[in-house]
Image (tube, grey):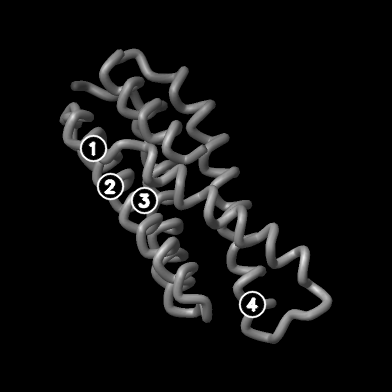
Amino acid sequence: MNLTDKERTLLQDQKSHEKICVQKYKDYANLASDQQLKEIFNRNGQTEQEHLNTINQLLNGQIPNMNQQRKSGSNQQAQQQMQQQQTNNFQIQSNLTNNQFQDQNLCTDMLMTEKYVSSSYNTAIFEFVDTNARQALNHIQKEEQ
């Protein structure tokens, strides 16, 4: 697969976004005080690493085999759990300990990051000529939502 300059630039941007997500999830899993939240961050970090691997394959001119990719259900479930955790944290904000407040901030930051990354895929998908590349990016974008 040959990439245009614009496609390569868009993929480089997405690669940068995915690297940041992987690092944030790793760091936040270590910072979180709630064990369930640590597990959610670790699972989401693994999904983001898969996204990064897919982007790297595209940059190398390879078409990723999307049948080998994880299904989006587990990532969506983890994000729903994270959103529920955030909702619970907001509801008890007046009684938060420092650790709980930190966990709330970690969730809020990751949700904002995921929303930004997801929206950047909305733009990138339509810039690609190759149908397989668009499908790979669409797969990632669905998991980002």
Task: Tell me what residue is drawn at x 17 percent, y 29 percent.
Answer: 65
Q: Secondary structure at mark 2?
A: helix
In this rendered view, identify the residue nearer to me: 68 or 73.
73
What residue did someone put label 3 on? 48
What residue did someone put label 4 on? 102
Other residues around mark 3 within 10 Å, as few (<14) / some (14–19) / many (≥20): many
Does residue 16 sit above or below 95 in this rendering? above
How many angstroms separate mark 1 from mark 2 (CA)?
8 Å
Left or right: where 4 falls relative to 35: left
Task: Tell me what residue is drawn at x 64 percent, y 77 percent.
Answer: 102
Q: Secondary structure at mark 3?
A: helix
Q: Position of residue 108 (x, y in %)?
A: 65, 60
Quadrant of the image occupied by residue 143: top left
Q: Position of residue 24 (x, y in %)?
A: 46, 65
| Residue contact between numbered discs 2 and 3, judged by CB atoms under 8 Å | yes
| Residue contact between numbered discs 1 and 4, judged by CB atoms under 8 Å | no
In this rendered view, identify the residue nearer to me: 126 or 2.
126
Task: Tell me what residue is drawn at x 45 percent, y 75 percent.
Answer: 35
| Residue contact between numbered discs 1 and 2, judged by CB atoms under 8 Å | yes
Other residues around mark 4 within 10 Å, as few (<14) / some (14–19) / many (≥20): some
What residue did someone put label 2 on? 50
